[in-house]
Image (spheres, rainbow, N blue to C red):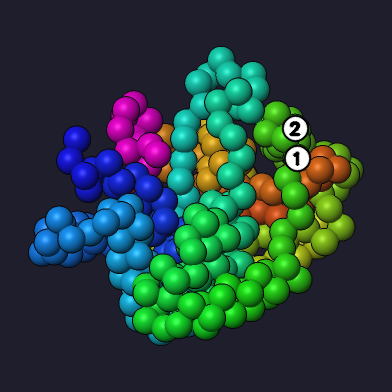
Amino acid sequence: MDEFSAHREHLVRVAYRMLGSLADAEDAVQETWLRWQRTDQSEIVEPRAWLTRVTGRICLDVLRSARVTREAYVGPWLPEPLVERLPTDASDPADLAELDDSVRIALLHLLERLSPEQRVAFILHDVFGIPFDGIAAALGTKAENARQLASRARRLLHDSAPPPLAPLSEQRATVEAFFDACQGGDLGRLTALLAPDVEFHSDGGGQVRAALRPIYGPDKVIRFTLGVLTGNGRSLEPEPALVNGQFGLVLRRAGELLGVVVPDVNADGRISRFSFIVNPEKLRHLLPVDGDSGVS
């Protein structure tokens, strides 16, 4: 394995957390590789640190140019889901993967509130432990400025941080109970499984039908969810999955991919948020029913 390949997976993780898109992350890492090839590698003392800084700088440029595009985005913007299928006989997904809050859909969505500079500084320092002098090199500023950017980002996120999640096994139990209650139309059970301030965010990107604004409150969320599950008169086929490190469902109808739904199950066993990604451009990397490649 060559030097760059040894760090490639790390660089993709860095870029995805900054950009919220696996495709964009891969493009950023490819650009990093091109710059690596054009550099005298014998002069690079710490390749991993150098590559991380370069990837951060490339992502900063992407974020700056993407701000205009995302401001014109139709409806809520959600990150591209990272999906790992569960074996059909898995009774406890906690045995298969550890929860990683840094890729949590709700957190990546929240990062959209930060400026590009704040986002890069926060992710490089708080998630990957990069020293501020290295972050400053990526941002083209001084170390103290990089420190202040990360600090401001931390304060902004602290006030709106999503609540901690229940263990994965409890997430699965709650999500499956909610889906079963939907199938049976049990409104009392559905309400009991939702937090009073529950939110529903759906991302269709203007390409498919989706709620153009977040939905708030148990009654409205239940009505919308039942509409999704019973639409077109055909039953929905939920496939359990790990999505960005938490339990979710890949939804199909008559074998056709509909979307990915990620419920946030709080420590009290109630769902506080749904993230529903139906934008086809964000689902292209998912496997077909009988495929065996493309899952992270």
Side of 293 where 115 appears, left or right: right
* Count of residue discs: 2
Residue 63, picture quadrant? bottom left
Residue 45, picture quadrant? bottom left
Residue 36 is inside the magenta segment: no
Mark 1 element type: loop
Amino acid, disc 2 = Glu
Q: Is residue 72 above or below residue 295?
A: below
Q: Position of residue 109 (x, y in %)?
A: 57, 64
Quarter the C terminus occupies: top left
User: Which stretch appears magenta?
Assistant: 286-296
Amino acid, disc 1 = Ala
Residue beneath disc 1: 166
> Along the line of sight, which residue is nearer the eye, 167 or 83?
167
Q: Label 2 near label 1: C-beta < 8 Å?
A: yes
Helix, strand or loop: magenta stretch: loop
Residue 293 is inside the magenta segment: yes
Residue beneath disc 2: 170
- Residue 281 appears in view: no
